[in-house]
Image (spheres, rainbow, N blue to C red):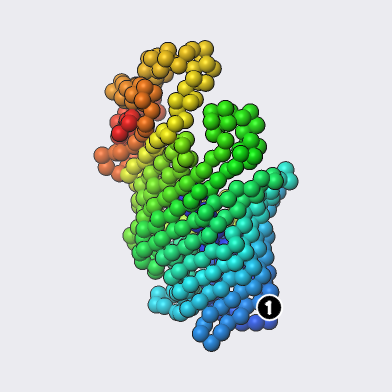
Amino acid sequence: MKNTLRAAVFLLLAATALTAPAQAQDVPPVVSAIFKSWEAQLKSTPAYDKIETDSSGNVTISNVAATVGAQDPSTTMKLSIGSIALENVAAEADGLIAVGAATFSDTKLEFAGPDGKSIVIEIPKSGAEDWYVAVLGANPTPLQSFRSTMGIAKKMTSGEIKVTAEGQSFTAKGVESAWSGDPVTGAGKTTMSLTDLVIPEAALAMMDPSSQLKALGYSDITLNMTGEGELSVAGDNFGMTGTFGVSSKDMAGFTFSYGASDIPIAVMAELQTAQKTGRPPDFNALMPQLMTVSLSGFKIRFEDASITKKVLPLIAKMQGMDEAAMVANAGVMIQFNLMQLKNQAFTDQVASAVNTFLKDPKSITLSLAPAAPLKVQQIMTLDPTNPGAAIDLFGASVTAND
């Protein structure tokens, strides 16, 4: 799962994976492992005041600061963390270090773009429980390199999150995630949630200067995000399935689901190497391996919670029609526009689903559910002049109010 929600959770652990400057003190193995993970992902060398350890193996890193490397040199991301406390640190088998509990205090991320505008994210306190840090050796396998970039913890929480952009502030109750699986490979199941991200009226007015949302009756917006996924590892390949959802209270919600397998871990190794060296990935070299990737399905679903009935009159007006006439003619317009797909059964299904939804807006869903997983190589051989055959092969369908 690779979406806004995942990035928010990644902040909790990635923001603590640090690379220390040369200092006259020993760096505990757990910190070294975290440092290497940070280097691989974010190309940064942070500074810190000090690292302290006690007789129980607990570690505290104080006053961390870093400017994180970015693909666009005109964009910067600055990170600061007041302190990172790692408790109950213990070496485990298979090159792992277990951290019983991690607490991150006063985390701050500041993104600045070429236009001088910035976004600041502040998290006063966040934490992780049962965090498994992979120790990367001198000659790691692709799987070991892949695993070392993962933030694997049985539980992560952020507490309140504050986002400030152009003088306006948003708040969220926080991010939570839970994971269970194999800490050696990273295979397992994850659930995540971002709760009550509130965009107040003043901020909404800045984002919507024409005040269309306010005219529709939305003076502010409350967003919630959820996600769940599973990573599987089989030999030199891995697979992913997941569902991500974002909803706005009294407005609408979107859900995305996907499934892919037989993804070569070597592909991830190439992407990591390209990022580390600052060069584009060599997709020409990767293409033979990518041909074996299997796609098992995809779904996008819209669930209405009031917005459709509010926007239909506006859409009808833009087309020079009244709402009733537009709804009545929707099926005919879809039939005409989809003729080029050369699949009458699918066209009829879409027209019927849209008619049903517009008359009684509840939900509408586009699904790709092939009879058997499709290899990329098989997809590449499809005839572009016969899209109807592709629609049948992918098992495409559109349904409403189900």
Report if residue 210 is visible in the image: yes
Q: Is residue 271 left or right of residue 81?
A: left
Which quarter of the rendering shows the C terminus?
Answer: top left
Report if residue 138 is visible in the image: no
The secondary element bearing badge 1 is classed as loop
Task: Check disc 1 and give the amino acid type.
Answer: Gln
User: What number of labels is visible?
Assistant: 1
Residue ID at (41%, 33%): 304
Does 68 appear above or below 201? below
Q: Residue furthest left?
A: 371
Does 271 appear above or below 375? below
Picture quadrant of residue 125 = bottom right
The residue wearing badge 1 is: 23
Residue ID at (46%, 43%): 246
Picture quadrant of residue 296 = top left
Q: Nearer the viewer, residue 331 or 326?
A: 326
Residue ID at (50%, 44%): 223
Q: Nearer the viewer, residue 61 or 369?
A: 61
Q: Residue furthest right?
A: 116
Does 254 appear above or below 225? above
